[in-house]
Amino acid sequence: MNEELEFFRDNVRRFIQEAIAPDYEQWEKAEIFPRQLWNLLGEHGLLAVDLPEEYGGAGADFNFSMLIQEEFARANFAAIGGPMAVHSDIVAHYLLNIGTEEQKQRYLPKMVSGECVGAVAMTEPGTGSDLQSVSTKAVADGDDFIINGSKTFITNGQHSDLIIVVARTNQDVPGSKGITLFLVDADTPGFSRGRNLEKIGLHAADTSELFFEDVRVPASSILGTLDGGFALLMGELVRERLALAVSAVGAAEGVLADTIEYVKQRKAFGSAVAEFQNTRFKLAELATDVRIHRSFIDECKQLFVDGKLDPATVSMSKVAATEMQGRVVDGCLQLHGGYGYMREYGVSRAYVDARVQRIYGGTSEIMKELISRSVLA
Ligand SMILES: Cc1cc2nc3c(=O)[nH]c(=O)nc-3n(C[C@H](O)[C@H](O)[C@H](O)COP(=O)(O)OP(=O)(O)OC[C@H]3O[C@@H](n4cnc5c(N)ncnc54)[C@H](O)[C@@H]3O)c2cc1C
């Protein structure tokens, strides 16, 4: 399989260089990448690659999907890689793991081709980390449910065709017991998108507010079980967090490689910046930091394939790898001096794009909370 993976890696890298690199800066300025990119990604077999063939996927191993994450991050195109992870590694796998046969047949082949873009809407203006407190409501009305509420910070908000909406269906039980997941098509009356949010990084990424005003959906749009959504969310967050950890290591490896080249050619006081002891020691520290996390996420990927990756361990990988990414981008930017602060240099983008990795998919603090529960159990 290693040979196949390396062959696939070459293809992904070629695609990135030919189809992403030439236009990325323009998409950053436009503050969103074009919708057609999804179709192109689908045509090149880069969406939801590890879905079974019966649903249009390539039936590839999980590592192929993680490789895509790693390569987009390494190439410093996180504003594409992140939305792809939401679509391929989160939404498609919610459907695969929890969906009915009819739901899978309806959405998955179109998600593989890029005709249907997926989003998952958990966060609300008043509730992020404390997911149990979502206030978007879905009230039964005959055989239907009527959804009211609003969501924010939703990746793929502008381009999505299918949104997994987390809504409260039972007010009389504790939060974790009265939440349901709904599949909402973006053309359902009452659904609307707010503005594409302005961010400090990931400019080309699509991140929006979403509004649900008397959105009527049939009971058949429930994903999983009525009132059972919270436990399902917790189960699926393992893969989401692992994908984030994998992208953190890929991004750190990429920015470190670029920085090594930069310090070799940049001169100060008559010698290359690479020759100062501070530079050499700093690079030694950063390379060690990256390598430790490479080993850990490779172990976590294998645990995931073996069905043994538990919530505490994946939380360790998410907090550790994303905090490491923060240290590495900061160190690398410093070694670039003033040029590191200029948008023209990739390290400046790596720096701002890295910041959110410690926030979305569960903040570092929430990861520590989850780890500590298992440590003290
Ligand atoms: C670019 C971007 C993309 C995103 N994409 C999506 C998406 O596709 N779908 C989606 O649903 N959401 C998405 N999010 C939302 C993201 O998951 C939340 O922002 C995140 O979970 C944190 O929630 P919050 O912003 O409400 O912060 P809050 O929960 O308000 O947290 C504020 C601070 O309090 C800390 N805190 C909270 N609770 C505790 C605690 N118990 N102990 C210690 N500290 C605590 C937090 O760690 C944080 O430092 C995205 C966010 C961003 C920025």
Image (cartoon, rainbow, N blue to C red):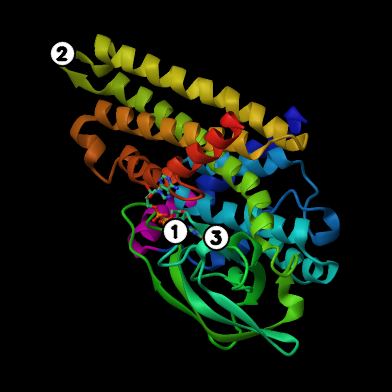
Reply above or below: 376 against 118.
above
**Measured Cα–Cα span from mark 2 to mark 3:** 60 Å
Q: Which residues are magenta?
A: 20-31
Rendered residue at 77%/72% (across/down): 106
Residue type marked 2: Gly
- Name the residue beneath numbered marker 2: 270
Place residue 225 in its image quadrant: bottom right
Find residue 342 and report its image quarter. top left
Structural distance between the alpha carbons of marks 3 and 1: 27 Å
Amino acid type, label 3 = Gln
Determine contact: label 2, label 3, CB under 8 Å.
Answer: no
Which comes sooner in the sequence, label 2 or label 3? 3
- Residue labelled 1 has its Cβ within 8 Å of some atom of ligand 1: yes
Residue with the mark numbered 1: 205
Q: Disc 3 marks which residue?
A: 132
Residue 54 highlighted magenta (yes or no): no
Q: 10 Å neighbourhood of mark 2: few (<14), some, or many (≥20)?
A: few
Q: Percent from the top left, x then y, of residue 312?
A: 60, 36
Picture coordinates of residue 260, whole percent (x, y): 37, 22
Q: Nearer the viewer, residue 65 or 364?
A: 364
Ligand 1 - quadrant of the structure image: bottom left
**Residue pictured at 57% horizontal, 44% vertical:** 241
Q: Dot 3, how many residues are within 10 Å of its Cα: few (below 14), some (14-19), or many (20+)?
A: some
Left or right: residue 206 compared with residue 67: left
Question: For residue 173, which quarter of the picture?
Answer: bottom right
